[in-house]
Amino acid sequence: MSAPRLAPITWGPPALFFALAVGFTAMTGQFSPAARAVPRLIGIAMLILCGLDLLSRLTTQTGRLIARWLNPAGLEEGPPTADPRLARRQGAATFAVVAFVASFAVLGILPAVALFTLLAPRLGGRIAWPRSLAIAAAMTALIWLLFARVLGLPLFPGLLFGGTW
């Protein structure tokens, strides 16, 4: 008896992010050794996490074991349903992450972090603008302080602000 086929809604998002992580990690090879350290680390972490996510969605004993290890409460919910509101929210969240990653290249790390951490709590969590602004300012300052000052790593300025591949 073969395992039941999984619907694309089950494996599609993690497969998309895995493919993006492969491309992102491969692209870091074009950077100088100092500039590629953190992006490559992020890419490898994404490959591992997306790979685990994909494996956890298998209907095999191994898949259920990994799912139980990653999120024991998630197994109680059962398989995903075809709720249009949920699909729209998942699509919006997926688009937001893809736009965030793309904005790294176009705007640079600090503007991308500032923009994402301003809009995500406001639009996704309905947090008031002043609190969202405080979150964005704190996260941007933390990223700058940690990477630029403490670790001494250059932060990519973005193609719009003088960055080059």
Image (tube, grey):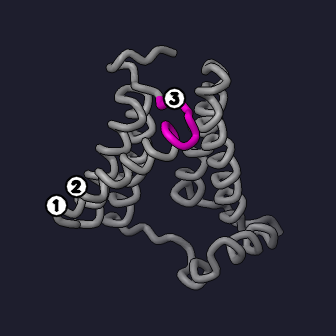
Residue located at (22% from left, 63% from top): 131
> Would you name the residue on which mark 3 appears?
154
Residue located at (73% from left, 73% from top): 64
Residue 105 coordinates in the image, percent (x, y): 43, 27
- C-alpha gap between disc 2 and disc 3: 25 Å
Magenta segment includes 27: no
> Would you name the residue on which mark 1 appears?
130
Left or right, 124 with reference to 19? left
Residue 130 coordinates in the image, percent (x, y): 16, 60
Please state which amino acid type lies under the numbered disc 1: Pro
Circle 1 crowding by C-alpha within 10 Å: few under 14, some 14–19, many from 20: few
User: SS class of the residue under badge 2?
Assistant: helix
Residue lying farthest to the front in this orientation: 150
User: SS class of the residue under badge 1?
Assistant: helix
Please state which amino acid type lies under the numbered disc 3: Pro
> Would you name the residue on which mark 2 appears?
133
